[in-house]
Image (tube, helix red, strand yellow):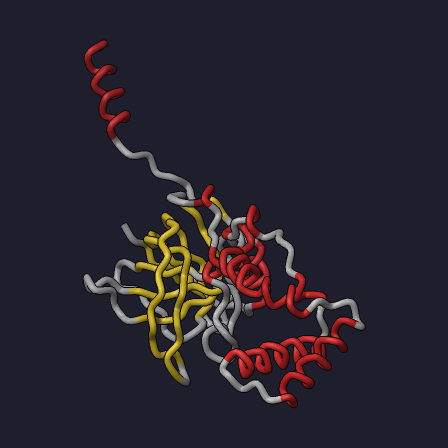
Amino acid sequence: MRHILSAIVVVLGASPLYAEPTPIDWPDLIDQSVQSYEDPFLDLDYEQVEDLRQVVALQAEMDGGKLSPETGTQLDEVKAALSAQGIDADWLISQRWIVAERRELASAAGNAALDGETISLGGFAIPAPPDEDGSAMAYLVPERGMCSHVPPPPPNQMVRLRLSDGWAPARIHEPIVVSGRINIDPSDRQMMVVDGFISMNATFSMDVDEVQTFGQSDKAEAPATNDWAKSLADGFQTGSKSGVKGQ
């Protein structure tokens, strides 16, 4: 009996346990540690931004050898107008690449605590070409219309989906809830979406184990996996639910 119990312990210890997906929402994907930084450009109004752009353009003309008195006078006047509003044009211009790097990091950095975790997340699916190995692919975004009528979301708000069992989005921006292992796996691929080629820049990839889909007239009676899915399910009229399970 002792040998049997020992064998069971060994088998159980060697077998991977099924991980119940942890429901998350889109803000959970963001690395919050890099979201707070000084951005002096946020305090500028439209006219001040335009004046600053003019300073950059005039300075570029002068640096390029166009040293006309008119250019120098115009540059001094624009700088003086900004200075009267408490704006140091030269300092702001010196900060633009620093701020650009901070913005890029904030938009791309993913939450390391979720790397390799099994999660469920609701969003809108965008069909994608197969991967190089032939795997069916799609993208998940948080809002309908993204990457077509409105710009793509930040990279840390896009997930590249590796699908299974033959399921694929029937239409662009199909509402779904996906479950599977998510990884920080940056990718940037050009693909045709509606009106032209779009850069699909995603911080995350997911090996999808299960897809919960909703028809146009569906009322999702199964438990929703997050607040987004709950509101989505509540908005559907009576109907049926369909799902596809993977590995």
| Image quadrant in which you'd find residue 195 | bottom left
In the rendered structure, the answer to whether residue 176 lies left or right of residue 164 reads right
Residue at point 58% right, 67% down? 235
| Image quadrant in which you'd find residue 1 | top left
Residue 12, position as x, y percentages in the image: 27, 26
Q: Is residue 245 above or below residue 93?
A: above
Q: In this view, does 219 lie above or below 195?
A: above
Residue at point 71% right, 70% down? 44
Residue 151, position as x, y percentages in the image: 50, 74
Residue 90 visible within the image: yes
In the rendered structure, the answer to whether residue 135 lies left or right of residue 203 reads left
Residue 76, position as x, y percentages in the image: 70, 79
| Image quadrant in which you'd find residue 186 | bottom left
Q: Which of 33 and 123 is in front in this view?
A: 33
Residue at point 50% right, 48% down? 23
Q: Nearer the viewer, residue 56 or 157?
A: 56
Residue 197, position as x, y percentages in the image: 37, 79
Task: Work out which residue is located at the far top of the displayed protein and give it.
Answer: 2
Residue at point 19% right, 61% down? 133
